[in-house]
Image: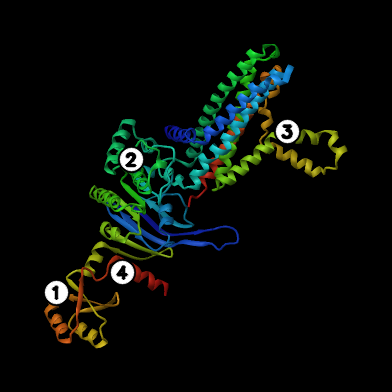
C-alpha cells in the first residue's frame, strides 16, 4: 500500500517585494510505500524541507497533488497517523517535557493514563528521564531534538515524517536515535525522512531519492546501491597511465579517479590475473576500499553533473 | 474542545511562568504602594484619587501584560516555527486560534484578578486611614470598573491574535495592536468632536474626511466604552443597559475578530 504519494508537485515562494520568486520544488513526484524507509537527500536549498512541509499540509503546493493513503490531505484526522519532527524543533521555553508530552497526547486523543505510560517509556528510551521535569529552555540542542522525537512518537503513529532527525545530536544521541528508527522499521512503521548525514541514510533507507534544485534527479533502492559493490574488490593505486587503464579494462577490471590516484574494481574471479599484471607493471597498491561508490560519492557526482 | 483546552493550558502555563510577569507585578505593587504614600496629599479628593490611581495602575499593568507577554504567546510560535510542531497534531488552525486566545484569556484574567485583589487591599487600607473622604464609594462599583478593564484586555488580546494571524513577525503584531489601542481609546472623542459645531469653527475639515472617520469608527475598537473609572471614583450610579451594551459589544467584537483570525489562519502557510 502506498502511504504517501507526491504527484507533479511544484512550489514557488515569494521572498518579498522587489525580489525574484524562488522555485523551491519543481514537478516533483515520488511514492513512499507502507512499511518502508524512504530517505530524501539533496544539497541545501534542494527543496527537501519544503516537500516535507507540503506533505504535512503546512505549505500548499502551487500545482500537483499530495495523497496520504490514496486520499487528498484534508481535515486533521490524517495527522493522527503521522508523527512529525521538524528541522531544529523549537519547543516552549517555560514548559517541562512532561507537560509538552501531555499536550501531545491530549491533542492526539489519548487518555491521561495512556499518555503517562507512553511518555515514561519514550523518555526512558531517549535518556531524558532525569530532565523530564525541567523547563525546556534549560535543554541542550541535542536534548531538544530528542524531546522533539518523543513529541512525534507519543501517539504511536504508523507513519513518521522526520526532517533532519540526527541534526544537533552527539554520537551517543545519534546512535540512540538510529537504533530507535531501526526498531520502528522492524515494527513495520513507514518512515519518510530527509537528512544530510548520508551514512545514516545509506544504512537506514530501503529507498533513497536525490533531490536537486527542486527536482528528483535520481531514485534508487538500497539493493541497487549494494549491487554496485557486489562481487568486487577495490584497490587504490597511484595515477595510472592511459595504457595501463586500457590493459586493466581488458583484463576485466574497472578504473575511476579517486582521491589523487585511481581506484580499480576487480571481479573476484579476475583477481589473480590482475594482481599478476600489477606486479609485472610495478603498479603499487596503496590500499583497499570496501565500496566502489558510496552514497556520498554518488551524491557529489550527480550534483556536480547537474551543475555543469 | 479537549484539544482547545489542552492548547489553552500550555499557553497559560507559558505565560504565567514568564519572568516579565514579575516585573509587571512589581510595577503594579509599586504603584499601589505609592498610592498609599501620597494619598494624604489630596485632601478631600483622597477617595477619588485612590480609586482612579488603582484602576489606572491595574489597566496599565494589564496593558503591559498583553503587549509584552501576550503578544509573544502567539507571535513566538510563528516566529520560531513552534507552530509547525503544534499543527502536526490533529488540531485545526481554527482550534489553534481559539486555544491560543483562551490561554491568553486565562493568563490575563488570573493576573488581573490577583492585581485586583492587591488593589482592593490598597483601597481598603486607604479607606480605613481616611474614612471620611470615601463618601459614595462602593466596592461593587470598583470591581465592576475592574472587570471592564479586564474586558478591555480581552478585546485587546483578540486584536493581538488577529494581527498575529496576519503577520509572521511578532514585533509587527505588537505595533499594530498598540496602534489599535491608541486609536481605540481616542476614537470616541474624535467622532464626538467632529460631530460638534466647534470642529467647523476651529478648522476647515473636509466632508469626505468626516465621512471617512465616521465609517472607520464602526470598524475600529471603541475601548472607551469599557472605561468606568469616573463612575467608580465619584460613586455615580451605573445603568444596567450600559453595562450590558458594553459587555455585549466587547464579546461580539472579540468573537468577530477571532473568526476573522481563524479564517486568515486557515489560508496561511508556515514555511
Taking the image as shown, residue A152 lies to the left or right of residue B220, namely left
Q: Which residue is mark 2?
A: A155
**Mark in front: 4 vs 3:** 4
Q: Can the viewer see residue A164? A: yes
Percent x, y for residue A173?
30, 50
Name which quarter of the figure residue A259 lies in: bottom left
**Mark in front: 4 vs 2:** 4
Q: Can the viewer see residue A69? A: no
Front position in the image: A108 or B150 = B150
Instruction: Tell whether label 2 touches label 1 (CB within 8 Å).
Output: no
Disc 1 or 2, which lies upstream in sequence? 2
Name which quarter of the figure residue B158 lies in: top right
Taking the image as shown, residue B69 lies to the left or right of residue B88, namely right
Q: Which residue is mark 3?
A: B188
Give me the C-alpha separation between circle 4 and circle 3. 71 Å
Quick one: quadrant of the C terminus of chain A?
bottom left
Using the rendered image, report if marks 3 and 2 lie on a common chain: no
Instruction: Tell whether label 2 touches label 4 (CB within 8 Å).
Output: no
Name which quarter of the figure residue A250 lies in: bottom left
Under tag 4, what secondary structure?
A: helix
**Callout 4: few (<14), some (14-19), or many (20+) C-alpha neighbours within 10 Å?**
few
Residue A196 is marked as: none
For image coordinates 54% across by 34% down, the residue present is: B23
Q: Which residue is mark 4?
A: A297
Q: Chain of mark 1?
A: A
**In this rendering, is residue A198 above or below B194?**
below
Q: Which residue is mark 1?
A: A268
Give me the C-alpha separation between circle 4 and circle 2. 38 Å
Disc 4 or 1, which lies upstream in sequence? 1
Percent x, y for residue A274?
15, 81
Disc 4 or 2, which lies upstream in sequence? 2
Amino acid at each position: 500500500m502506498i502511504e504517501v504519494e507526491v504527484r507533479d508537485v511544484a512550489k514557488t515562494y515569494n521572498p518579498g517585494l522587489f525580489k525574484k520568486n524562488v522555485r523551491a520544488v519543481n514537478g516533483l513526484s515520488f511514492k513512499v510505500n507502507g512499511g518502508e524507509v524512504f530517505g530524501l537527500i539533496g544539497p541545501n536549498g534542494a527543496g527537501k524541507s519544503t516537500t516535507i512541509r507540503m506533505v504535512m499540509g503546512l505549505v500548499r503546493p502551487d500545482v500537483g497533488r499530495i495523497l496520504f493513503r490514496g486520499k487528498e490531505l484534508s481535515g486533521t484526522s490524517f495527522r493522527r497517523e503521522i508523527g512529525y519532527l521538524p528541522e531544529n524543533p523549537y519547543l516552549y521555553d517555560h514548559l517541562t517535557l512532561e507537560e509538552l508530552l501531555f499536550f501531545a497526547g491530549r491533542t492526539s486523543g489519548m487518555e491521561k493514563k495512556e499518555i503517562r505510560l507512553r511518555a515514561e517509556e519514550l523518555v526512558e528510551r531517549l535518556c531524558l528521564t532525569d530532565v523530564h521535569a525541567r523547563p525546556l529552555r534549560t535543554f541542550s540542542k541535542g536534548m531538544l531534538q530528542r524531546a522533539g522525537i518523543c513529541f512525534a512518537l507519543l501517539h504511536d503513529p504508523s507513519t513518521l515524517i522526520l526532517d533532519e532527525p540526527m541534526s544537533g545530536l552527539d554520537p551517543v544521541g545519534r546512535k540512540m536515535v538510529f537504533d530507535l528508527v531501526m526498531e520502528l522499521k522492524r515494527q513495520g512503521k513507514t518512515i519518510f525522512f530527509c537528512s544530510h548525514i548520508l551514512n545514516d541514510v545509506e544504512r537506514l533507507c530501503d529507498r533513497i531519492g536525490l533531490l536537486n534544485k527542486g527536482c528528483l534527479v535520481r531514485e534508487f533502492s538500497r539493493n541497487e546501491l549494494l549491487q554496485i559493490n557486489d562481487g568486487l574488490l577495490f584497490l587504490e593505486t597511484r595515477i595510472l597511465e592511459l595504457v595501463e587503464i586500457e590493459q586493466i579494462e581488458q583484463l576485466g577490471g574497472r578504473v575511476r579517479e579517486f582521491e589523487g590516484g585511481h581506484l580499480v574494481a576487480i571481479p573476484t574471479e579476475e583477481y589473480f590475473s590482475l594482481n599478476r599484471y600489477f606486479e609485472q607493471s610495478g603498479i603499487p597498491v596503496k590500499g583497499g576500499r570496501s565500496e566502489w561508490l558510496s552514497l556520498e560519492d554518488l551524491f557529489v557526482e550527480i550534483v556536480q553533473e547537474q551543475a555543469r | 474542545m479537549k484539544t482547545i483546552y489542552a492548547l489553552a493550558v500550555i499557553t497559560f502555563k507559558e505565560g504565567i511562568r514568564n519572568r516579565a510577569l514579575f516585573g509587571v507585578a512589581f510595577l503594579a505593587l509599586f504603584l499601589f504602594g505609592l498610592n498609599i504614600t501620597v494619598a494624604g496629599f489630596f485632601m478631600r479628593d483622597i477617595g477619588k484619587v485612590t480609586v482612579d490611581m488603582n484602576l489606572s495602575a491595574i489597566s496599565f499593568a494589564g496593558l503591559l501584560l498583553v503587549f509584552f507577554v501576550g503578544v509573544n504567546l502567539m507571535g513566538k510560535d510563528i516566529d520560531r516555527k513552534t507552530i509547525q510542531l503544534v499543527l502536526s497534531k490533529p488540531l485545526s488552525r481554527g482550534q489553534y486560534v481559539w486555544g491560543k486566545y483562551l490561554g491568553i484569556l486565562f493568563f490575563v484574567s488570573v493576573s488581573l484578578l490577583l492585581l485586583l485583589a492587591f488593589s482592593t487591599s490598597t483601597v481598603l487600607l486607604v479607606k480605613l486611614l481616611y474614612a471620611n473622604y470615601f463618601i459614595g464609594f462602593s466596592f461593587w462599583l470598583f470591581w465592576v470598573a475592574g472587570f471592564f478593564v479586564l474586558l478591555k484586555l480581552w478585546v485587546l488580546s483578540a486584536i493581538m491574535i488577529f494581527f498575529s494571524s496576519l503577520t509572521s513577525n511578532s514585533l509587527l503584531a505588537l505595533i499594530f495592536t498598540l496602534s489599535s489601542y491608541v486609536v481605540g481609546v481616542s476614537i470616541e472623542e474624535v467622532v464626538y468632536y467632529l460631530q460638534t459645531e466647534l470642529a467647523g469653527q476651529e478648522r476647515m475639515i473636509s466632508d469626505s474626511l468626516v465621512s471617512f472617520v465616521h465609517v472607520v469608527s464602526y470598524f475600529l475598537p471603541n475601548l472607551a466604552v469599557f472605561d468606568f473609572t469616573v463612575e467608580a471614583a465619584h460613586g455615580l450610579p451605573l445603568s444596567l443597559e450600559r453595562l450590558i451594551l458594553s459587555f455585549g459589544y466587547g464579546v461580539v467584537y472579540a468573537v468577530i475578530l477571532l473568526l476573522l483570525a481563524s479564517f486568515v489562519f486557515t489560508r496561511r502557510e508556515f514555511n
